């Protein structure tokens, strides 16, 4: 990883922001520069997003359109970006739909010149649970973020689509939660598993082979330590564990009610 990312690397690069009633906001990261934000964390992100460094330039103002395939509204500066985001969102909804999980309310996806971690630097994207919207950095600005990570070895467009899939999965799962999880791993397992599943098979194989010391998915326990300290390992094994199951969909539906054996449940 680059030196300027070292503080984030120890916590990973894919971020989850959660809150517990009566406690200060928590900001913990692990994976690929994608964050989930809630309450005041979302407000902090919004405040930074309103700054010039976190929005599209005035000459590149975004237009919004509803995807033809699904109740997903895409805000982006170009028709190509909107088409790509709609295509990725459709993939995410199909993967979840195979498990009987669907959108309950329209979801907003915003493609921006830059998305920033509320307390740090540029990130791939952000899911704002309060506003139920996905913010994703423009594809043109992704290369500098994937530098020196396994994602840099993947075709840029394929990885970028999977990034949008990841965040849309967060949005749909959030709408269907029956019990709030106390584990960040529980939120990231479905997003990673389906992100990797959405990649073309040859690209997926390249990513899987880039992670050494892959263990058998049998009896693997997913926890926050693995997520934060080795997010790429977490991503690979989430996918493998999901695909190895006789009924991987049961894992996703179990996560919605907080009843899975492979992710420890912490006290509320």
Image (cartoon, grey):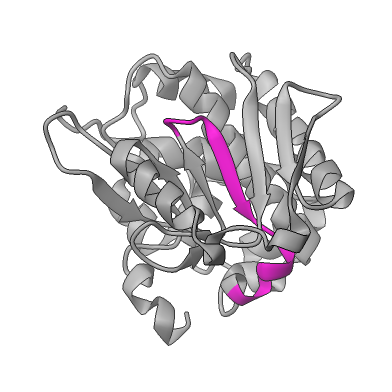
Which of the 4 image quadrants contains residue 36? Answer: top left
* Viewer-nearest residue: 170 or 244: 170
Q: Quadrant of the C terminus?
A: top left
Q: Position of residue 98 (x, y in %)?
A: 69, 20
Q: Position of residue 192 (x, y in %)?
A: 55, 45
The answer, for residue 221, to whether it is visible in the render is no
Q: Is residue 186 above or below residue 138?
A: above
Magenta segment includes 73:
no
The residue at the point 37 percent across, 43 percent down is: 43
Which of the 4 image quadrants contains residue 230? Answer: bottom left
The answer, for residue 63, to whether it is visible in the render is yes
Q: In the image, 228: left or right of 134?
A: left
Q: Position of residue 202 (x, y in %)?
A: 80, 57
The residue at the point 69 percent across, 49 percent down is: 162
Q: Position of residue 150 (x, y in %)?
A: 60, 70
* Viewer-nearest residue: 24 or 209: 24
Q: Which residues are magenta?
A: 129-144
* Viewer-nearest residue: 239 or 107: 107
């Amino acid at each position: 990883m680059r030196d300027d990312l070292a503080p984030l690397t120890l916590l990973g690069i894919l971020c989850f922001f959660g809150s517990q009633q009566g406690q200060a906001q928590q900001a913990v990261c692990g994976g690929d520069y994608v964050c989930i934000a809630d309450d005041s964390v979302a407000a902090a992100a919004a405040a930074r997003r309103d700054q010039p460094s976190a929005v599209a330039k005035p000459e590149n103002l975004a237009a919004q359109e509803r995807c033809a395939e699904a109740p997903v509204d895409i805000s982006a500066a170009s028709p190509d970006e909107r088409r790509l985001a709609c295509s990725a969102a459709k993939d995410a909804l199909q993967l979840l739909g195979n498990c009987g999980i669907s959108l309950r309310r329209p979801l907003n996806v915003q493609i921006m010149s830059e998305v920033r971690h509320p307390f740090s630097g540029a990130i791939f994207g952000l899911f704002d649970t309060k506003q139920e919207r996905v913010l994703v950095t423009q594809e043109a600005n992704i290369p500098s973020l994937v530098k020196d990570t396994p994602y840099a070895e993947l075709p840029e467009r394929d990885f970028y689509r999977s990034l949008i899939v990841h965040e849309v999965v967060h949005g749909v799962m959030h709408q269907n939660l029956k019990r709030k999880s106390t584990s960040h791993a529980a939120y990231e397992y479905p997003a990673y598993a389906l992100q990797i599943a959405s990649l073309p098979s040859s690209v997926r194989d390249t990513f899987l082979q880039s992670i050494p010391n892959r263990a058998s998915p049998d009896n693997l326990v997913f926890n926050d330590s693995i997520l934060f300290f080795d997010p790429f390992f977490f991503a690979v094994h989430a996918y493998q564990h999901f695909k190895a199951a006789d009924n991987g969909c049961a894992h996703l539906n179990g996560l919605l009610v907080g009843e899975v054996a492979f992710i420890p449940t912490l006290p509320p």
